[in-house]
Image: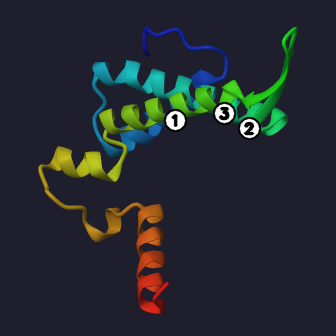
Amino acid sequence: MSVIYMPQGVNVIYKKILATLKKEREIKKSDLDAIALLAQNIIYYQDANRTIDEHGFMITSTTEKGTTIKQNPACIAADNAQRMMVRLMEQLMMTPKSKVLADGRSELKEEEVDPIAAALLNLKKKREKNGT
């Protein structure tokens, strides 16, 4: 178990990530804190997105100087959590690219290609074929 404080709800995600990683490789003690931080950032990301769903991307703020419309601060929180999640996933070798680098290979095997990247490449090929 990690020594990092984990707010309510994080422990469930922590255990799921830990179980998934144990199926793939041996877990080192140094991985536990990164797993805890990843679980924590998943909760932060979900909370921020719930706030965005509830209040929208833009919010109205009224002060003594008047009313302004500005970006919901939860957008920044979601972005920060997402960036941290990606870094931690790379550190824990949970991305195709980090697995390739850990194996000492220079390329991804075809089955390791990110499905989103593959879909975008297919779309690009179709557009090039159609001339759009």
Dot 1 falls on a residue whose secondary structure is helix
Q: Residue 10: x and y, percent?
A: 60, 23
Query: Which residue is nearer to you in this view: 115 or 17?
Result: 115
Q: In the picture shown, does residue 83 fall above or below 65?
A: below
Query: Residue lying farthest bottom?
Result: 130
Badge 2: how crowded within 10 Å, few (<14), some, or many (20+)?
A: some
Q: Which mark is residue 62?
A: none
**Could you tell me the amino acid type at mark 1?**
Gln
**Marked residue nearer the N-terminal end (3 or 1):** 3
Q: How many marks?
A: 3
Residue 14 appears in the figure: no
Q: In the picture shown, does residue 29 fall above or below 50?
A: above
Q: Residue 57 carries which label?
A: 2
Q: Mark 1 points at which residue?
A: 82
Dot 3 falls on a residue whose secondary structure is helix
**Marked residue nearer the N-terminal end (2 or 1):** 2
Q: In the picture shown, does residue 56 fall above or below 9?
A: below
**Could you tell me the amino acid type at mark 2?**
Phe
